[in-house]
Image: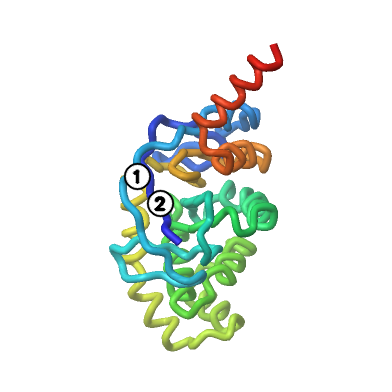
Amino acid sequence: MKMKLMTVAACALLTMGCGGDGQGEEAAKAAPADEAAAKAAPSGAAAAAAAAAPAGSTKSVGDYVPPTTETAEARVQILEFSDFQCPFCSRVNPTMAKIKETYKGDVAIAFLHNALPFHKDARPAAMAAVAADNQGKFWEMHDKLFADKSKRSEADFVAIATELGLDVDKFKTDWAAAGAKVQADMTMCRSHGVGGVPGFLINGRLMSGAQPFPTFKKVIEEELNGGFEATQKKAAAAGKKAG
């Protein structure tokens, strides 16, 4: 599977998320689903592509191959940029789970770390996720970290690793060295115009904030039917035929 890292053609609505400038947690307001979907940027030209690794694994820093939910070719690729301390990132998790269930085989979701600097516990948690990923337990650690944001000490991470049945000595070593991978993800976030969290690139179309499932569904369905432009042309043709 090729994870397509696309350039963004236009800025999407930033709502219900934590901003890269430290704003957004208190001030963010939800926008109607149709409005948010309408402002998701149409697909742009491919900027780069990374060869996919098996689910729950990553390659070396610089390859930009994040943990991914699917190993087969999927017609829709979602890059999720997230922060383990952001309340909005937690809020969107049930939506992502529903997407996985609804579009199994058609949609692949890849997770990249965007640990905002004003979230002091986000980076250590991201490093714990990277260390768990090295032993094939990224998603299990992901769920544990989002379930209880009070557990953010090294001892807490080790306790979770033990609960997940990981090699604790390897986990400790990998955790200490995981900062470079987290920083590489964050650099990639900036290069694709994603400042706040959660942010998503859906086949290259930027969507920001903890949007509800119908908002994601609208964009995903467009991509499954040939993309934004193709969908608009079909709608226009149907309108003319009806008229």
| Residues at circles 1 and 2 in contact by the CB criterion of under 8 Å | yes
Q: How many marks?
A: 2
Q: Is residue 188 above or below residue 237?
A: below
Q: Is residue 52 above or below residue 80?
A: below
Estimate the x, y position of residue 141 in percent, counting from the top left. 56, 71
User: Image check: 7 left or right of 81?
Assistant: left
Circle 1 sits on which residue? 46
Structural crowding at the residue carrying mark 2, measured as other residues with C-alpha within 10 Å and reported as few (<14), some (14–19) or many (≥20): many
Amino acid at dot 2? Lys
Secondary element at tag 2: strand
Circle 2 sits on which residue? 4
Secondary element at tag 1: strand
Estimate the x, y position of residue 242 in percent, counting from the top left. 71, 16
| Real-space CA distance between mark 1 and mark 2, rounded to the nearest whole angstrom | 7 Å
Residue 18 shows in the view = yes
Estimate the x, y position of residue 37 in percent, counting from the top left. 58, 32
Amino acid at dot 1? Ala
Estimate the x, y position of residue 12 in percent, counting from the top left. 47, 32
- Residue ID at (42%, 56%): 3
- Residue ID at (50%, 44%): 202
Q: Give the position of the C terminus as an image quadrant.
A: top right
Foreground: 199 or 106? 106
